[in-house]
Image (cartoon, coloured by chain):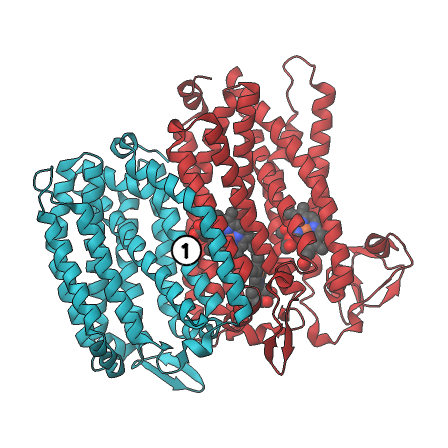
Chain colours: A cyan, B red
């Protein structure tokens, strides 16, 4: 494979990992807040059991994504940075409030409900803002004046694509995190809570699908070039629809536990679906990083740096994978941990 | 205000805020590792209590260090796109490896904190080691990028294009060793002095039980010894860094010292205000020959003055003050910790030994002083590089973004930092108030 394609594939992989991990992280934070408010302590505690060790690790994936992108495609930094400064700064503000308030909430009793409310809501909004950047990256909303590029904010706000993308971001986040929590609660042996989350997933699944399709179709007026590419990739989208259907139905598949289906299978298949659809989206986007000015070829780093970065990745992963496995076993497999509560850190 | 100035303000403020928490996590994670080891060696459960309370503090500090780190990492691309274009081609490697250090630190912190009761002693020590290792590795790796900005190497610029890239040569640029050792020694000394300050603050209270007094006293001595050693080491590494400036970036040394005329037997000027009109530092205290001697161990050495360089390349002369504050704090802290230890050593046999109030007060001041040292040191280093972002290669004005809206963004972040500073202090204060030492001592059976 040509280096530049390998590089963009790597970026896609990181983006995909962060999209899934971030959805689960922010969504779970929202559920922890939601169920605390409704005095469903169990559902909230289990969400927190996952969150407290995991949020830092998820955050590193975000940083990895940003750093890898700038390192592999430095030529995109000027345009992208200038255009996206407002949404990115908004995300940074919310992200900081979210993480800090979550940690504060773990450490104080008195204001913990208020702190959790703020962090839950901030977390809910972050993925929506991140996804709303997508319609801006395919052109249509950018103008040039005095050599500077601007996003046409008013036009963006008037465009249906903007809102379908926001809706899609919210639904995906809540859907994937519900599925994840169904499985996590089941692993903890708390079937009551698992049922609660499964109910959320049942409602959110079809909504996610509707928003996904709406997001694609509302793009037509702004980015017909991309839509034309979509048509060539129909096979990927069909596969992705199948994966969705199979995953959703897995919530009813026969299992030892009454009325839970196979949440693990459902989660994995939905992640596959998400992967297929986002890979197709990414391919339709190529070769542009930012339509029509920045392509992957212009933005790519030199080959020496690319080689070093690749070696860095491989060595880094080789060192870290055993640690990740250990981490998984301690927090996702260990019954004593899963069922405990009052982790006071 | 123009874009460049606003970008500098926004980025400088963000870094200055991140570094408070980042430095503390580097220092405190090492202390946790020490406590875990002492706990095994001395079979003294007080160290388990210490480790537990430090870990709690670390978890709260990381709640701010991690998102603010994310802020600066993303802002680097948003505010300095011209700089990042070069970074991506030449010095991306340390940034990328740093991520793996972050992974190490966060994974092992989670394991250490949330799985401590399920781990064997060895694994607990190993986990605490990797937390400390991850933290110091991130400091060294980011310093690699920072020192490359001072002494850029590992590439050529031909007709404005970057060629002949050697990522390793860039990551290990000339100033890398001296600078990163200085950063590590100062982070450790600051972590230690902050803990010295906390213990001394506690010892002021008259109502302590004997057990509690004992615990704080033990903590104070332990951290004081370490702080003393680290501040001596900081003097050495700071000296090496100054020699590095003399050899590699003479204009920065000239600005730091307020030296206008190139001369041998150059004096060291303490404080005062450098004045280009007067061609000298006004109101400073001169030690003849000292600067030449410090740079080369010989008063004959010629030190280049600012007048040798075009004025458009001068950094803001305020760096003279920043540099002086840093060096003074360095000397002062060696003094405070040295005198404290001497006092203790002489009088330690006394029944019911206590530090006098004035020493305790000095100890309490040492923590904030060290933090001021870190802040002035970094701002000196970054501001002293002006007007260059990459020394002699890229001007700050060419690195900055052209985007609008920076004023309002700066305002929002400034408010955020102020709020976080207040809430974090309150959370730390109330957490330790609600979970007093006596409670941790009895629950850990010490
Ligand atoms: C507790 C903090 C602290 C203390 C007491 C000192 N320093 Fe320092 N110094 C730093 C904290 C620091 C720092 C924050 O770590 C810096 C900023 C950038 C860097 O590389 O390290 C630094 C930079 C720095 C530089 C500039 C490097 C550059 O611009 O690239 C020099 C020349 C010195 N130091 C020299 C000294 C000397 C001679 C000291 C006398 C004891 C001293 N420092 C004490
Ligand atoms: C020399 C100054 C600095 C020191 C000592 C330092 C140290 C640290 C430490 C110890 C952490 C916590 C790591 C963790 O637990 O994950 C941290 C977080 C972080 N720092 Fe800094 N840092 C410095 C400067 C910078 C700069 C200039 C950047 C930007 C390029 C940066 C980017 C980050 C990021 C992205 C994080 C969050 C990582 C995460 O998500 O876990 N740091 N820093
Ligand atoms: C952690 C402590 C740090 C502090 C407090 C700090 C402070 C500052 C300040 C005050 C400025 C504005 C300078 C001016 O315009 O006068 C600045 C600029 C900058 N610093 Fe640092 N800095 C720190 C560490 C770093 C590190 C580790 C890096 C390297 C990765 C770095 C990279 C930059 C860049 C790229 C700029 C903008 C370009 C420029 O003004 O030259 N800083 N920093």
Q: Quadrant of ligand 3?
A: bottom right
Q: Secondary structure at mark 1?
A: helix
Drawn side of residue B398 relative to residue A341, left or right: right
Q: Quarter-wise, where is residue B214 in the image?
A: top right
Asked if residue B371 is positioned above or below residue A227 in the image, the reply reads above
**Extreme residue toward the bottom, this view:** A146
Q: Quarter-wise, where is residue B16 in the image?
A: bottom right
Horizontal and vertical percent position of residue A341? 27, 32
Q: Chain of mark 1?
A: B
**Extreme residue toward the front, this view:** A1
Drawn side of residue A288 relative to residue A220, left or right: right
Q: Nearer the viewer, residue B19 or B413?
A: B19
Give the labeled residue for mark 1. Answer: B416
- Quarter containing the C terminus of chain A: top left
Horizontal and vertical percent position of residue B49? 47, 25
Asked if residue A292 is positioned above or below residue B422 in the image, the reply reads below
Horizontal and vertical percent position of residue A294? 41, 79
Asked if residue B209 is positioned above or below residue A116 in the image, the reply reads above
Horizontal and vertical percent position of residue A142? 34, 81
Q: Residue at x 50, y 27 (%)?
A: B50
- Quarter containing the N terminus of chain A: bottom left
Residue B114 visible? The answer is: yes
- Estimate how packed mark 1 is, as few (under 14), some (14 to 19) or many (20 or more) residues with alpha carbons within 10 Å: some
Drawn side of residue A155 relative to residue A10, left or right: left
Q: Residue at x 19, y 64 (%)?
A: A240
Q: Nearer the viewer, residue B171 or B236?
A: B171
């Amino acid at each position: 494979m040509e280096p530049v394609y390998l590089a963009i594939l790597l970026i896609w992989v990181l983006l995909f990992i962060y999209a899934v991990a971030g959805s689960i992280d922010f969504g779970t934070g929202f559920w922890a807040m939601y169920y605390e408010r409704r005095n469903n302590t169990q559902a909230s505690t289990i969400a927190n059991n996952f969150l407290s060790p995991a949020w830092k690790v998820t955050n590193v994936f975000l940083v990895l994504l940003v750093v890898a992108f700038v390192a592999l495609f430095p030529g995109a930094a000027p345009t992208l940075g200038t255009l996206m400064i407002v949404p990115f700064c908004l995300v940074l503000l919310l992200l900081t409030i979210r993480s800090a308030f979550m940690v504060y909430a773990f450490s104080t009793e008195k204001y913990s409900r208020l702190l959790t409310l703020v962090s839950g809501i901030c977390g809910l909004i972050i993925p929506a803002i991140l996804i709303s950047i997508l319609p801006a990256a395919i052109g249509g909303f950018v103008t040039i004046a005095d050599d500077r590029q601007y996003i046409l904010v008013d036009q963006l706000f008037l465009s249906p694509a903007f809102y379908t993308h926001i809706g899609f971001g919210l639904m995906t986040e809540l859907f994937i995190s519900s599925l994840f929590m169904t499985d996590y609660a089941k692993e903890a042996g708390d079937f009551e809570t698992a049922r609660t989350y499964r109910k959320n997933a049942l409602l959110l699944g079809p909504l996610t699908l509707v928003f996904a399709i709406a997001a694609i179709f509302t793009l037509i007026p702004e980015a017909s070039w991309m839509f034309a590419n979509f048509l060539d990739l129909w096979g990927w989208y069909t596969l992705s629809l199948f994966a969705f259907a199979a995953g959703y139905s897995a919530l009813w598949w026969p299992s030892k536990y009454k009325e839970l289906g196979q949440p693990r299978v459902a989660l994995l298949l939905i992640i596959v679906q998400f992967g297929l659809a986002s890979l197709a989206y990414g391919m339709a986007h190529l070769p542009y990083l930012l339509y029509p000015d920045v392509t992957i070829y212009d933005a790519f780093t030199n080959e020496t740096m690319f080689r070093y970065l690749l070696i860095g990745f491989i060595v880094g992963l080789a060192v870290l994978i055993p640690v990740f496995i250990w981490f998984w076993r301690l927090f996702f497999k260990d019954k004593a941990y899963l069922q405990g509560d009052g982790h006071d850190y | 205000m123009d874009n460049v100035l606003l970008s500098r303000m926004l980025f400088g403020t963000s870094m200055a805020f991140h570094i408070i928490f980042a430095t503390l996590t580097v220092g405190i994670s090492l202390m946790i590792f020490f406590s875990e080891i002492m706990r095994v060696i001395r079979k003294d459960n007080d160290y388990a209590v210490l480790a537990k309370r430090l870990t709690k503090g670390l978890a709260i500090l990381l709640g701010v260090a991690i998102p603010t780190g994310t802020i600066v990492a993303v802002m680097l691309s948003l505010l300095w796109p011209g700089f990042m274009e070069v970074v991506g081609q030449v010095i991306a490697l340390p940034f990328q490896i740093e991520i793996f250090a972050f992974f190490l630190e966060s994974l092992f912190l989670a394991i250490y904190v949330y799985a401590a009761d399920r781990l064997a002693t060895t694994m607990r020590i190993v986990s605490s080691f990797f937390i400390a290792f991850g933290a110091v590795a991130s400091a060294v790796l980011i310093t690699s990028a920072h020192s490359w900005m001072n002494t850029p190497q590992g590439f050529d610029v031909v007709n404005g294009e970057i060629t002949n890239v050697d990522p390793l040569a860039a990551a290990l640029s000339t100033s890398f060793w001296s600078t990163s050792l200085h950063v590590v020694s100062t982070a450790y000394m600051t972590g230690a002095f902050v803990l010295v300050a906390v213990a001394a603050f506690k010892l002021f209270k008259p109502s302590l039980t004997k057990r509690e007094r004992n615990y704080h006293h033990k903590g104070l001595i332990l951290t004081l010894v370490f702080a003393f050693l680290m501040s001596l080491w900081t003097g050495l590494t700071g000296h090496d860094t100054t020699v590095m400036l003399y050899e590699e970036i003479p204009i920065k040394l000239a600005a730091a010292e307020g030296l206008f005329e190139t001369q041998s037997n150059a004096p060291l000027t303490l404080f005062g205000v450098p004045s280009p009109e007067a061609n000298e530092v006004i109101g400073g205290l001169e030690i003849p020959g000292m600067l030449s001697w410090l740079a080369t161990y010989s008063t004959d050495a010629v030190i280049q003055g600012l007048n040798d360089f075009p004025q458009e390349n001068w950094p803001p002369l305020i760096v003279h003050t920043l540099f002086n504050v840093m060096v003074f704090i360095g000397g002062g802290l060696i003094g405070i910790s040295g005198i404290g230890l001497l006092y203790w050593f002489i009088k330690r046999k006394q029944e019911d030994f206590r530090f006098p109030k004035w020493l305790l007060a000095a100890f309490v001041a040492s923590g904030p002083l060290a933090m001021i040292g870190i802040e002035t040191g970094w701002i000196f280093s970054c501001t002293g590089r002006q007007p260059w972002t990459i020394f002699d290669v890229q001007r700050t004005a060419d690195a900055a973004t052209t985007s609008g809206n920076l004023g309002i963004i700066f305002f929002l972040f400034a408010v955020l930092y102020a709020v976080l500073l207040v809430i974090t202090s309150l959370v730390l204060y109330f957490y330790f108030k609600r979970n007093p030492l006596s409670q941790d001592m009895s629950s850990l059976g010490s």
